[in-house]
Image (tube, grey):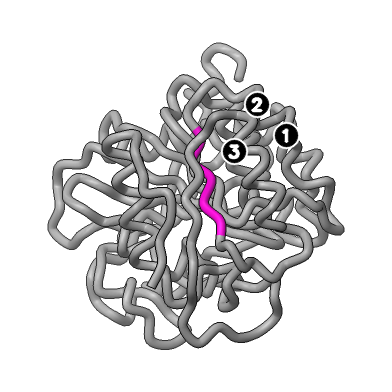
Amino acid sequence: MRPGALRRVVALVLVLAAPPAALAQGKDPNAAFANELLVAQLPGRSIAALVTHRPGARNFTHAVALFPGSPGQVGLSAENGEIKFRGLRGNFLVRARRHFLENGFLTVVIDAPSDYQLGVFPHSFRASERYGEDIRGVLAEVTKRYGELDWTFAGHSEGTVSAVQATRMTAPRVKRVVLASTLTGGNFQGPGVRYSEVKALSVPVLWVHHRDDPCRATPYSTVKDWAAELHASLLTVIGSKDPRGDPCEARSEHGFAGREVQTIKAILAWIRTGQSPAEISE
């Protein structure tokens, strides 16, 4: 970003804290927490982010930015005091974000920019300096509101593309990145995550993958090999509870069905200590 560019960012923050009605479209256990919609206005576009933390919390030390899977367009908005999602409400990171909320932690679900809410949200754009400027704009506004934080970026499935590229363009401010169910096989929006792109990152990487991930674009064997070659931590998840739906959707093993809590607790341990268990099983 050019010097002084962040000064042109204007943020609209809608605070919708605690009451269950604050998150529309059905029962959501995350609605019991404080949820705030932040919209950073940049030249010619905006980018929305949903901040969630414990009700009444005032002092924050850590932020986990969450990049949900395909197509990456959450469609966050606020109507009559309610935060609404157009899609991706059931994504692993979005639906289970409350489990990250240990003392001092908040989460930030990052939407696609306003000019990429319709049509494709291509991987080539996510690798662009423009996208880096958008993400830095969100981080700047979160910092203004909550102070300096220890940042972790976490992506799930196609969101790992965003997480890798955003980490590359915001380091050293971002301290580490979590890649869950990494898209290594590509899809209609682009080639996915490349080994060379992860190898070039200057921050620690935690790979999180289900051993029996049924999605053809996210094979466990590829991630296992890459983690070994990079000497990076790999958290292998084993087992599930009531998996259902498309193999590449959020309610199968691809989305850690029935293993959300254990998986996130292991991620939190890695964030705090740099160490995680090798696997989670029944």
Q: How far apart are marks 3 and 2 (CA)?
A: 10 Å
Chief secondary structure of the magenta span?
A: strand
Q: Report x, y in % for residue 165.
A: 65, 34
Give 13 or 179, whichever is nearer the viewer. Answer: 179
Q: How far apart are marks 1 and 3 (CA)?
A: 10 Å
Q: Do the residues labelled 1 and 2 touch (CB within 8 Å)?
A: yes
Q: Are marks 1 and 3 in contact (CB under 8 Å)?
A: no
Give 43 or 222, whichever is nearer the viewer. Answer: 222
Q: How far apart are marks 1 and 2 (CA)?
A: 6 Å
Q: In which quarter of the image is residue 197?
A: top right
- Badge 1, how many Cα within 10 Å: few under 14, some, many 20+? some
Look at mark 2 in the image and give the residue it sits on.
Answer: 199
Magenta-drawn segment: 205-209
Horizontal side, residue 155 vs residue 122: left or right? left
Q: Which amino acid does label 2 sit on?
A: Lys
Q: What element carries label 1?
A: helix
The numbered mark at residue 227 is 3
Which residue is at a point 78% across and 64% down the rendered structure image? 216
